[in-house]
Amino acid sequence: MTTEIITAFRKSSYSDQQGDCLETAGTAGEGHAVRDSKSPTGTVLRIGSSPWSMFLTAVKADAFSAGS
């Protein structure tokens, strides 16, 4: 099943100046699509709303920092 991308892709304001970043877009069903900004025509990862919410919670809690 393919989830339709319903918003434009946007780059995070936290992206570094070397272009090492991801872009996200909203999908139908309140999920998100993620792609590499250096390869906009490449693979797109689609993530449902619940996993996306869990991911954001973990990021905000700094769960991915070195040594965690």
Image (cartoon, rainbow, N blue to C red):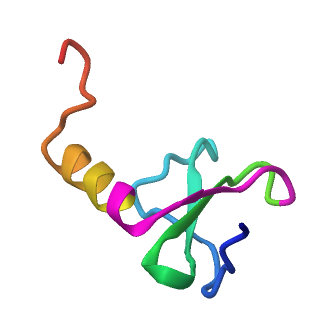
Furthest-left residue in view? Answer: 61
Task: Please tell me whether residue 44 is drawn above or below residue 28 in the rendered image.
Answer: above
Q: Is residue 67 left or right of residue 38?
A: left
Task: Please tell me whether residue 33 is drawn above or below residue 27 in the rendered image.
Answer: above
Furthest-front residue in view? Answer: 1
Q: Which residue is found at the position 47% from the left and 71% from the top? A: 31
Q: Is residue 53 left or right of residue 46?
A: left
Q: Which residue is found at the position 71% from the left and 56% from the top? A: 44
User: On the rendered image, what quadrant is the N terminus found in?
Assistant: bottom right
Nearest to the observer: residue 2 or residue 40 = 2
Q: Which residue is found at the position 63% from the left and 87% from the top? A: 6
Nearest to the observer: residue 6 or residue 11 = 6
* Residue 19 locus on image (x, y percent): 64, 47
Q: How many marks?
A: 0
User: On the rendered image, what quadrant is the C terminus found in?
Assistant: top left
Furthest-right residue in view? Answer: 41
* Residue 48 locus on image (x, y percent): 47, 64
Q: Is residue 11 left or right of residue 44?
A: left
Range shown magenta: 41-51
Q: Is residue 45 magenta?
A: yes
* Residue 59 locus on image (x, y percent): 25, 46
Furthest-top residue in view? Answer: 67
Task: Please tell me whether residue 8 is drawn above or below residue 53 in the rendered image.
Answer: below
